[in-house]
């Protein structure tokens, strides 16, 4: 089964479609089928993106990417510090 990746904007559009279908009285399985996803995917998307506008979702994704980049920097610096500490204690 091929796994699709949706952008934050696409997810929000699909969630808006789901809201419209829900207001028409459709249940979750019918909603998921009509927007082309699994029920669990709709639930997960609602948790993560529920109530966000397109601009907020874009900003959210940018912040997640920056957070990952900063975490990598911290790991690299911590590793450098540990190496220097080991080297300094070995010289004594």
Image (cartoon, rainbow, N blue to C red):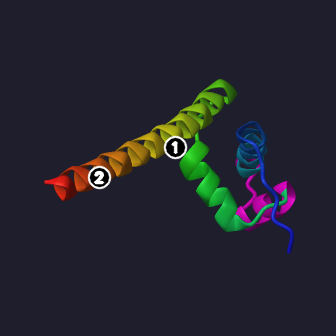
Q: Earlier in the sequence, mark 1 or mark 2?
A: 1
Instruction: Please tell me which residue lies in front, 48 or 27.
Output: 48
Residue 48 picture location, percent across and down: 56, 48
Q: Is 72 contained in the magenta span? A: no
Q: Residues within 10 Å of mark 1 (few under 14, many from 20)?
A: few
Going by the picture, which residue comes out furthest to the left?
92
User: Which dot, 1 or 2, sits closer to the camera?
Assistant: 2
Instruction: Please tell me which residue lies in front, 29 or 4.
Output: 4
Q: Is 41 above or below relative to 80? A: below
Question: Which image quarter: residue 51?
Answer: top right
Instruction: Please tell me which residue lies in front, 73 or 36.
Output: 73
Residue 84 picture location, percent across and down: 29, 48
The residue at 40%/48% (across/down) is: 75
Q: Is 1 above or below relative to 16? A: below
Instruction: Please tell me which residue lies in front, 70 or 37.
Output: 70
Q: Is 55 left or right of 76, judged from the image as shown? A: right
The chief SS type of the magenta part is: helix
Going by the picture, which residue comes out furthest to the bottom?
1
Quarter of the rendering occupied by the N terminus = bottom right
Q: Residues within 10 Å of mark 2 (few under 14, many from 20)?
A: few
The residue at 79%/61% (across/down) is: 37
Tag of residue 34: none
Q: CA distance from mark 1 to mark 2?
A: 21 Å
Residue 81 picture location, percent across and down: 30, 46
Which residue is labeled 1 in the image?
A: 68
Q: Is 2 left or right of 53, judged from the image as shown? A: right
Q: Secondary structure at mark 2?
A: helix
Q: Are marks 1 and 2 in contact (CB under 8 Å)?
A: no
Question: Which image quarter: residue 19?
Answer: top right
Question: Which image quarter: residue 56?
Answer: top right
Which residue is labeled 2 in the image?
A: 82
- The segment highlighted magenta reads 23-35
């Amino acid at each position: 089964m091929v796994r699709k990746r949706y952008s934050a904007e696409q997810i929000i559009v699909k969630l808006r479609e789901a809201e419209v279908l829900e207001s028409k009285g459709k249940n979750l399985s019918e909603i998921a089928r009509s927007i082309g996803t699994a029920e669990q995917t709709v639930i997960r998307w609602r948790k993560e993106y529920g109530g966000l506008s397109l601009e907020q979702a874009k900003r959210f994704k940018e912040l997640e990417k920056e957070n990952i980049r900063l975490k990598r920097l911290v790991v690299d610096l911590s590793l450098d510090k540990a190496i220097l500490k080991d080297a300094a204690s070995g010289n004594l």
